[in-house]
Image: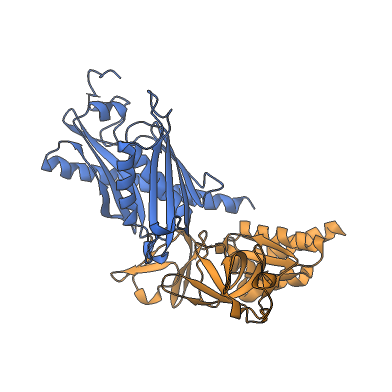
Amino acid sequence: MLKPERLIVDGKRLDGRKADELRPIKIEADFLKRADGSCYLEMGKNKVVAAVYGPREAHPRHIQDPVKAVIRYRYNMAPFSVEERKRPGPDRRSVEISKVSKEAFEAVIMKELFPRSVIDIFVEVLQADAGSRTACINAASVALVDAGIPMKGILTSVAVAKVEGTLVLDPMKEEDNFGEADMPFAFLIRGGKIESIALLQMDGRMSKEEIKEAIKLAKKGAMEIYKLQREAIMKKFLEEEENE
Amino acid sequence: MRRIVLPGDFLSSNPKVAGYGTYVEGDKVYAKILGLFDETDNSIRVIPLKGKYVPSVGDTIIGIVREVSANGWTLDINSPYQAFLPMLENPETKPGKKINDVLDMGDAVIAKVVNIDPRMRVTVTMKDKTCRAIRFGRIVAINPARVPRVIGKKGSMIKLIKSELDVQIVVGQNGLIWLNGDRKKVSLAEEVIYLIEEEAHTEGLTDRVAEFVRRRKNAQT
């Protein structure tokens, strides 16, 4: 990919968005028939599918925890999800993303209700733009709700990047590649407001003030995504009613 | 119409009313599962729409024998946990009779949960008048969260199916339902159960089911 000359022109980004605007999002809950809970999500050019299985019996036995459920999270990119074929299978990057996402979900899922069991979360990236981990967390969240798993609230994730000195919400590929910094967040949303931060990573550098500003921006974006996640689940169950 | 709530939705600021499907944190009651919000004068709860069966003591369940050991049977109960039926909890056990002649792999039983330890090891018994081995009939599986609707308020739905169709039914809390009787009637009962499962979260279901059964019975005769 060639570096565009300017990433922000007249306060507008390459795709015409303002600094605090999200990419278009599409969410469909209960996308897969065989999974206990599932979700298909598009966030800009990202396309991801999440499937949740469980709680179910943990195998092999030695991974069982006698007092709480074990959570497995697998983030995986399809070989065709990026321009240059990605070698299939887990690599350093996807193992890391799986780990941090799993830890974010461990803070939300009420694991102690299901001792000795396992909850499997699989997320497959079909097409990647920037911020696929945030898209995956959003999809997994909806899938977990759809599976009827007890949780403290809902996780909503969004990234903020620093591009040519300005903070932008939900960066796309060009901004991620040629920007100065990138900061993905995941928030726990409960009772209609942001309760805590469940995931925070950073790539690049930002000043203290910029981080404060970034959190503000991310919270604003997260609330918008949360509304869409809610709608997607509601829509699924209201539709069922209309089909009588 | 009861509204749908999602995990983390704020429900009440009175922790005393918190019921099933809710949790309390700092004097506030939140929903912990996806479900329908049900509010009465002195309690609030969330009726689940989805989810796995979690055993609780006293439940009548249907299990399928997965393992036979020297002292009992391990049952698959359509849940994250397996159940154990000790040999002495089965009244059919007799001295001199081999254990796999009493119940063998793949056999189905109606049993009752008697004990669950903190590690979720489930023990069941067959020493109850509702319990027995299933040797005939049909078993249908539904989403365990919809079982209360199949039973209906004080058993109204199940009574309706029994009287209208003249079939034997035992509903396991784990989402497995045993049906027995005339083949055509059992098939119709099966359809009715799937209908209830499909539309479990809608109002006035009993009346609609009654109408459905009558319509189908007229079509058959």
Residue A227 place in picture, x, y as percent: 39, 48
- Count of all numbered marks drawn on residues in the image: 0
Give B150 or A227, whichever is nearer the viewer. B150
**Above-or-below relation of A158 to B180:** above
Residue A97 place in picture, x, y as percent: 31, 42
Residue A125 place in picture, x, y as percent: 41, 36
Q: Which quadrant is the N terminus of chain A positioned in?
A: top left
Image quadrant in which you'd find residue A211? top left
Image quadrant in which you'd find residue A157? top left
**Above-or-below relation of A204 to A228:** above
Q: Residue at x 84, y 60 (%)?
A: B218
Q: Residue at x 62, y 65 (%)?
A: B65
Image quadrant in which you'd find residue B14? bottom left
**Above-or-below relation of A158 to A82:** below
Supply the letter of whichever chain is blue. A
Q: Is residue B154 in sight in this rendering?
A: yes
Q: Residue at x 60, y 61 (%)?
A: B200
Q: Is residue B204 in sight in this rendering?
A: no
Q: Residue at x 39, y 29 (%)?
A: A87
For the view shown, which residue lies furthest in the left direction? A208
Q: Colour of chain B?
A: orange
For the view shown, which residue lies furthest in the front direction? B96
Q: How is the image coloured?
A: by chain
Residue B58 place in picture, x, y as percent: 55, 78
Q: In this image, B173 relative to A182: left or right?
A: right
For the view shown, which residue lies furthest in the right direction? B221
Give B95 or B178, whichever is nearer the viewer. B95
Q: In this image, B74 relative to A189: left or right?
A: right
